[in-house]
Amino acid sequence: MKKLFVTAFLSLAAIGSAQAADMALPVKAPPPAPWSWTGFYIGGNGGYSWGNWDSTSLTAIFPGPGGTLVNSASPNVQGAIAGGQIGYNWQISPQWLAGVEADGQ
């Protein structure tokens, strides 16, 4: 039984010293590159809309056929929605960004 304890103790001591040897060498990671927002981008978006829109007002909101004015509407607002955007940004300094963008929905 005494041999078992001695063997276990020596095994643990050897493992501990092996792990400690790894810690003795200093490891330095290279500094990260500064982040920049400068560059071209393109993206898309999509979704779905569902619901009803009922509008009744005392004032005319839509011109009807023949020039008559209609003061209520109940359009169906269900369907797919999609769009995209494209642009370019210039990072002038760490605090300032300029860019151009075009989008369509």
Image (spheres, helix red, strand yellow):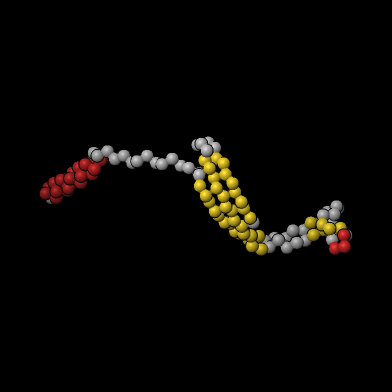
**Quarter of image, res 20:** top left
Q: Can residue 34 be seen in this view?
A: yes
The answer to whether 29 is drawn above or below residue 76 in the figure is above
Seen at 86% across and 53% down, the residue is 58
Residue 104 appears left or right of 23: right
Seen at 52% across and 38% down, the residue is 92
Image quadrant where one finds the C terminus: bottom right
**Quarter of image, res 74:** bottom right
Seen at 50% across and 36% down, the residue is 94
Q: Nearer the viewer, residue 64 or 6?
A: 64
Pinpoint residue 11: horizontal percent, then vertical percent: 17, 48
The answer to whether 96 is drawn above or below residue 59 in the figure is above
Q: Is residue 16 visible?
A: no
Pinpoint residue 10: horizontal percent, then vertical percent: 15, 45
Seen at 11% across and 49% down, the residue is 3
Q: Which of 71 and 99 is in front in this view?
A: 99
Q: Residue placed farthest to the left in the image?
A: 3
Pinpoint residue 66: horizontal percent, then vertical percent: 87, 62
Residue 2 appears left or right of 101: left
Residue 41 appears left or right of 26: right
Residue 55 appears left or right of 5: right
User: How many dots with numbers?
Assistant: 0
**Quarter of image, res 33:** top left
Pinpoint residue 37: horizontal percent, then vertical percent: 50, 44
